[in-house]
Image (cartoon, rainbow, N blue to C red):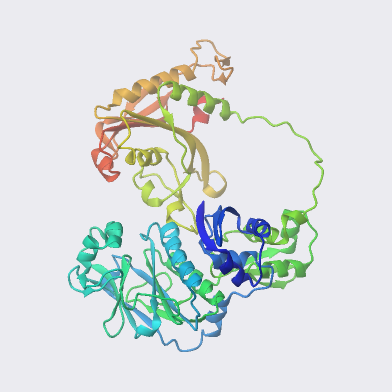
Amino acid sequence: MAGITISKKDLESLLKKALSIAELETLLHSVKGELKETNGDELKIDLDDTNRPDLLCTEGIAREIKNEKTRRNADVDTEEHRNLKINHQILVDEGIKDIRPYIGGFIAKGLSLTEGGLAQLIQTQEKLADNYGRNRKNISIGIYNAEEITFPVSYKAVAPEERKFVPLEFDREITLKEILELHPKGKEYAYILKGFSKYPLLEDSKGNVLSFPPIINSNSVGRVETGNSNLFCDITGTNLEQVLLVSNILAQNLKDRGAEIILVEVKYPYDTKLGKNVVLPYDFKEEIKINKTDFEKLLGLKLETAKIIEELDKSGYRTTLSNEQFTIKPPSYRRDIMHSVDVIEDFAIRYGYNNFEPEELNEFTVGKTTLIEPIIQKLRKLMIGAGFEEIVSNILTSKNQMLGNVEPLESIIEIENPVSDTYSVLRNSIVPSLLSVESISSKSVYPHKIFEIGEVVVSDSTVNYGSRTIVNLTALISYPEASFSDLHSVLDILLYYSFPDSKQSGNKKDVDGIITKGLGYSNNLQRTEHPSFIKGRAANILVNNKSMGIIGEVHPQVLEDWKIRNPVVVFELKDIEKIFVK
């Protein structure tokens, strides 16, 4: 969930109509938003859809809730100017490739920048860089007075003490190294450039410094004030697609405020997945084909073709029809459309859920828990009884986090078009989640004993889509004397009470009434070697002579990577349904 603060007057100026608070609360449903607080003209809004960075601003909300046809102006400009000569370039230096390799930009001309518009522009800049750009690590944004810039602009790597300029909020020239040491923003974001011998610098053809990305703008060219009519926006980052998307969002926002968007061409000396020359704002040129019957079947409605096109047009889609099949092009400022269902959902929101006629139930079924749920509840009680605290974490995570997994050799299921690197893969182990919690828990009283029972996704070529979801149980202990035996005893107790002693054949109910396998169990450990564990301190967990998990003392290098100070021992039981449910 993301929260933003906007001006009611600014929103109304973009909508070109006044709104009551009651009307606004209803309209916010279309952006999955909720009005949390009003303070005069100030509105605080919480947004549930974290896949929509374009909504982190007044302009994005206005685009979604207005009830009129709209055109995606950034895309229109791209198409209209595609064959024209582009007069503004950003020249990228070879040396920046391994530091912060991607940059985008555009010019907004003829803008009437009011005080409210400037405040919103700054907030949008911060929200996109912090929320979507992971505190500027993946994405950072610079906004400048274009009147002070002479193109082409150069994006290069320079030595920390090679160049000096006056940063915002300072009155004297200092080096890039000094900015990281003395400037508040430099201190806050210095970690992004840690380990690099050179730093990014953006300057124009006359040698005027625009900024030190992703840290701070210059105090001359990089100072934007009310009344500026021509702006240059740059976006730098580590992911080209994110750079392009943020550029498109900002271009559309400024277009909505009356600016003319001038295209800028970025020239790379090295190959990118889009070639060496990239024009921004960027047209992703992606289309989705959906049959009219798909809309009707999924929504349970009989729909006119014209109505579908009309409502999708209001949501910024460009739609054409041929033989009852729609070819739909999403807005350039959205990258969350991965399936036809996403488009149909947008249509339903615009159509209005209150316009759906309710139907009576024609079937009645009795609900019941799945076979694994009683097992999960029992294991949860046993772990809590052993003094462990439960955590709940996301099944979606980052690839970087999973590279620290105790089983890095297993393949990881990746999301094809992730909106953010933070949620780009499906975890195949819960261990990284526990290590992540432990890494930020150093101030808590030791010993630390935590566990999680949750879903993971593993590769399986025998099932649909080549992957399978299973439930694992993972536990962690950490304190200065933590050792293998600490957790081995917990594992023994856990399995002992989960498998009642049964020497006779047939099924048997345990004390909780759960039917378990009637052959009893055998719990053994089989020594194994793994780079994420200390040599000689790791073992496969055998249940009924089958390897069903791993236990061991985590290697000091792994602990150092996670910035964990004390020894850690973990175990992970894999696919507990296969272990405990017949």
Quarter of the picture holding the C terminus: top right
Which residue is at the far left?
161
Q: Given the current orientation, which residue lies at the most extreme front position? A: 40
The correct choice, above or below, for 77 with respect to 38 in the image is below
Q: Is 517 above or below relative to 112? A: above
Horizontal relation, residue 244 to residue 182: left or right: right
Q: Residue furthest top?
A: 504
Q: Position of residue 3 (x, y in %)?
A: 51, 55
Q: In which quarter of the image is residue 321?
A: bottom right
- 158 and 33: which is toward the camera: 33
Depicted 491 relative to depicted 156: above or below: above
Q: Quadrant of residue 242?
A: bottom left
**Residue 20 spot, x, y in % from top left:** 67, 61
Taking the spot 45% from the left edge, 62% from the top edge, the residue there is: 128
Residue 283 shows in the view: no
Is any part of residue 130 visible from this angle? yes
Q: How many labels does the image show?
A: 0
